Amino acid sequence: MTDFDPRSDAETADLQARLLDAMLLNVPFDGWSETAFREAAQAAGVDLPLARVICPRGAVDLAVAYHRRGDAAMRAALGAEDLSGLRFRDRIARAVELRLTAADREAVRRGSALFALPQHAATGAKLVWETADAIWDALGDSSDDINWYSKRATLSAVYGATVLYWLGDESEGGAATRAFLDRRIGDVMGIESAKARVKDSRVLSTLFAAPIWLAGRVRAPGARGASAGGGANAEGQGRA
């Protein structure tokens, strides 16, 4: 085997991809387990000690890589589609549909069991947040205030619930999952409409002046520097 340079990101990514491809052949039988990880290393022709350098947490790191591979596939698929004729809520629904299309049901089922374990729950929650963030970024979200957090939090809840429903969906073409997703997005739109009514009401905006002021002080990570116009546009997107 050629010498491995741990400082080479490209080589590390290539070896991890090889391990992941080999791992996916074993996941339906052994899950995201140590046994499957060892077999994947052997099948990929990667020495086990080297595999552990690449994936210190073994199968968990490959499960994370699999999830992020799905996010990347979803972003690419979204970039290839013309969504201009869709309502914003339908663009979100389409993004979630594409994300599910990029996933293997059994691999996700096994992954859900893995990330339900207490020691991996935080990692699982972070991955769901990353998916929500990827969707909003792909759809051009420019919010830089508390809306940046609220959009990703609500979409994380919608996405997580939809994935669990999808895992048990046996309807033709996933029609039941789409209907479930539409209902969940409708619930979120209802919340956004209520928020808008509070802002537009002199009485309610006065009553909630302190919370509104505090919310206005919150900024997105990295202070994205969106203009006031961009923030207003993002708020409009949230209510679309």
Image (cartoon, rainbow, N blue to C red):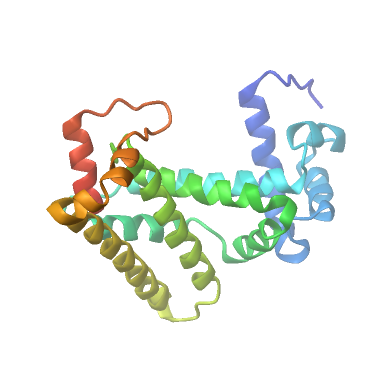
Observer-nearest residue: 232 or 102?
Answer: 232
Classify 41 as above or below 155.
above
Q: How many marks?
A: 0
- Asked if one can make out residue 3 in the rendered structure from this viewpoint, the answer is yes
| Residue 126 drawn at (x, y percent) | 56, 46
* Residue at screen point 68% across, 37% down: 16
Whether 5 is drawn above or below 36: the answer is above
Above/below status of 196 relative to 50: below
- Give residue 167's position: percent from left, percent from top: 55, 71
**Where does residue 239 sit, x and y in percent of width and height?**
22, 55
Vertical position of residue 217 compared to residue 63: above or below? above
Tell me which residue sits at (50%, 80%) in the image: 170
From the viewer's perspective, is 122 left or right of 96?
Answer: right
Q: Is residue 179 left or right of residue 236?
A: right
**Residue 143 figure quarter:** top left
Which residue does the image show at 22% across and 60% down from the upper left? 193
Position of the C terminus, as image quadrant, is bottom left
Is residue 79 visible in this depiction of the protein? no
Quarter of the image for the N terminus: give it: top right
In this view, the residue in front, 237 or 17, is 237
Residue at image location 68% in from the left, 63% down from the top: 113
In the rendered structure, the answer to whether residue 6 lies left or right of residue 144 reads right
Front in this rendered view, residue 151 or 215 = 215
* Residue 11, horizontal then vertical, whole percent: 66, 26
